[in-house]
Image (cartoon, rainbow, N blue to C red):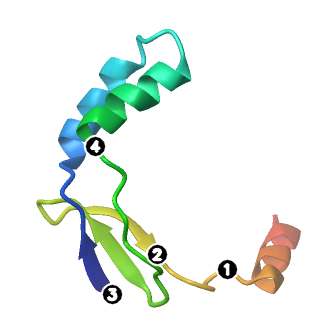
Amino acid sequence: LTPVQTDWDVDRFADSAKASRNLSNSTQQRQKLAKYFAAPSFGHLTEPTTLVDKHGRILTWYLPEILTADRVVRFSRIY
């Protein structure tokens, strides 16, 4: 998978997110996090991609069309 890197440090983000839970509303939480963690712009992803933080730790995988509607329906019938 093609890695795409953000300048975030996932540990620092997690610590900030935990600390912001004490704020009175979700708007304040988003504003506090946005102050230190600008939303990255990766453009339009069309290939399978791994999103990583600045240390190369995986944040998420982008796997386009891995779960087609048919697969979701078949999977939900099993369970």
Question: Is residue 32 shown above or below 25?
Answer: below
Q: CA distance from mark 2 to mark 3?
A: 9 Å
Question: Is residue 25 shown above or below 48?
Answer: above
Q: CA distance from mark 1 to mark 2?
A: 11 Å
Q: Amino acid at mark 1?
A: Leu
Q: CA distance from mark 2 to mark 4?
A: 20 Å
Q: Which residue is mark 3?
A: 1
The reply to whether callout 2 and callout 4 are in contact (CB within 8 Å) is no
Counting from the top left corner in percent of width and height, residue 71 is at: 76, 82
Q: Amino acid at mark 4?
A: Phe
Between disc 3 and disc 1, whose residue precedes? 3
Residue at 34 percent of width and 75 percent of height = 50
Q: Which residue is mark 1?
A: 67
Residue at 83 percent of width and 79 percent of height = 74
Between disc 2 and disc 4, whose residue precedes? 4
Quadrant location of the N terminus in the rendered image: bottom left
Counting from the top left corner in percent of width and height, residue 57 is at: 20, 62
Question: Is residue 43 shown above or below 60?
Answer: below
- Determine crowd level at label 1: few under 14, some 14-19, many 20+ residues with C-alpha closer than 10 A: few
Q: Secondary structure at mark 1?
A: loop
Q: Which residue is mark 2?
A: 62
* 78 left or right, relative to 22: right
Q: CA distance from mark 3 to mark 1?
A: 17 Å
- Determine crowd level at label 2: few under 14, some 14-19, many 20+ residues with C-alpha closer than 10 A: some
Between disc 4 and disc 1, whose residue precedes? 4
The answer to whether residue 17 shows anywhere in this view is: no
Quadrant location of the C terminus in the rendered image: bottom right
